Image (cartoon, coloured by chain):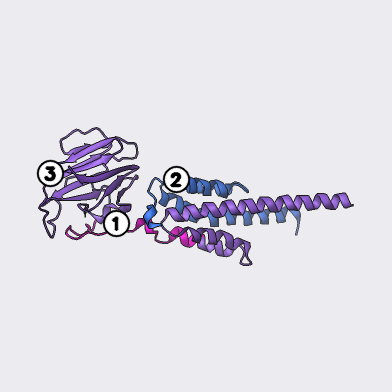
Chain colours: A blue, B purple
Amino acid sequence: MKKGGLVRTRRGARGLMALVLIIPTWRICTRAGFSGALSLFHLVPVIGSFIVMALLAFSDWPNGEASPARR
Amino acid sequence: MGVEIAALMGFFGLTSAFALVATILAAWMAWRIVEKTGLPGWAGLGAILLTLTGVGSIVPLVLLWIFAFMRWPRDDPARALPGYGAAPAGGPPRPAPPRALAPPAAALADRRAWKLTGGGLALIVDGSATAYVLTGAPAAQPTELSVPDPSIGRPHARLLIAAGRLGLEDLGTAGGTFIDGARLLPEHGPRDISAARSIRLGTVELALSRA
């Protein structure tokens, strides 16, 4: 395969992977009460997923969280 | 040659160390996220640790999709208490006219007023009206109870009184309403909170007692 074709294939695979992550993360963010657009951080290479996870893990969810008694 | 090999080994060691730290961090965050939904935290931890096994990243990805679209225990109805009407068929939002609380199965003999305390507030619900609106805005009417906090909706919830019992109805604001930690949603309708110990409006926790 030529170099240009390989680069396109890799970019396509990366985009598809990001989409597969973005759709469920968009849903999780909206259910938590955040903007679904936060899930677009997945498009940032390497640290993008960590940023979304950190936001969800360490901030108070506007739509409420399960009470400690339920955990 | 020996120096090059040593440098290469050092590079891979550093990469492995970063990968290890990243995995631990991701597992910890996954634990916290999953816990916030009411599911056991170890499920999130397990999903991340699965990436270290031979199953690769497909299974965690499938688990992520399941997690996103499954029912979360956080969204389960608040504990149902007998005596108050079934949830109305219509969904939110419908904060308009105060509805009367459905007749409870048994009236309470104790007719003292109810008191909500917390967040520097002390709200008295004396039963002179059948419905009170809890709002984050300044109270404009005697039937409005102001809880000045950014997390409180305008209006946020409704208190209903019938036969000495106190009911609570969420009006569908983002901050949420909780009875003893259980989420109350607008579609649940009015719930009896006479036996509850506390309610939470947004981030404001109010202890319920008799005045």
| Label 3 in the same subunit as label 1 | yes
Q: Residue at x 12, y 54 (%)?
A: B108
Which element type, helix, strand or loop, lies under badge 3? loop
Mark 2–mark 3 distance (CA, rounded to whole Å): 40 Å
Q: Give coordinates of residue B131: x percent, y percent.
A: 16, 45
Q: Give coordinates of residue A29: x percent, y percent.
A: 45, 50
Which element type, helix, strand or loop, lies under badge 2? loop
First-in-chain label (3 vs 1): 1
Nearer the observer: mark 1 or 2; the answer is 1
Q: Give coordinates of residue B40: x percent, y percent.
A: 45, 60
Chain containing the residue with disc 3? B
Residue sitting at the far right: B1
Q: Which residues are magenta?
A: B64-90
> If the image is split into quadrants, where does the C terminus of chain B sit?
top left
Q: Amino acid at mark 2?
A: Ser
Which element type, helix, strand or loop, lies under badge 1? loop
* Label 3–label 1 contact, CB within 8 A: no
Q: Give coordinates of residue B117: x percent, y percent.
A: 25, 40
| Label 2 in the same subunit as label 3 | no
Residue pointed to by mark 3: B127
User: In the figure, B66 relative to B171: above or below?
Assistant: below
Give the quarter of the image for residue B85: bottom left
Chain containing the residue with disc 2? A
User: In the figure, B98 relative to A23: above or below?
Assistant: above
What numbered label is drawn on residue A35?
A: 2
* Label 1–label 2 contact, CB within 8 A: no
Would residue A34 be visible to someone looking at this image?
A: yes
Q: Is residue A34 left or right of residue B116?
A: right
What numbered label is drawn on residue B78?
A: 1
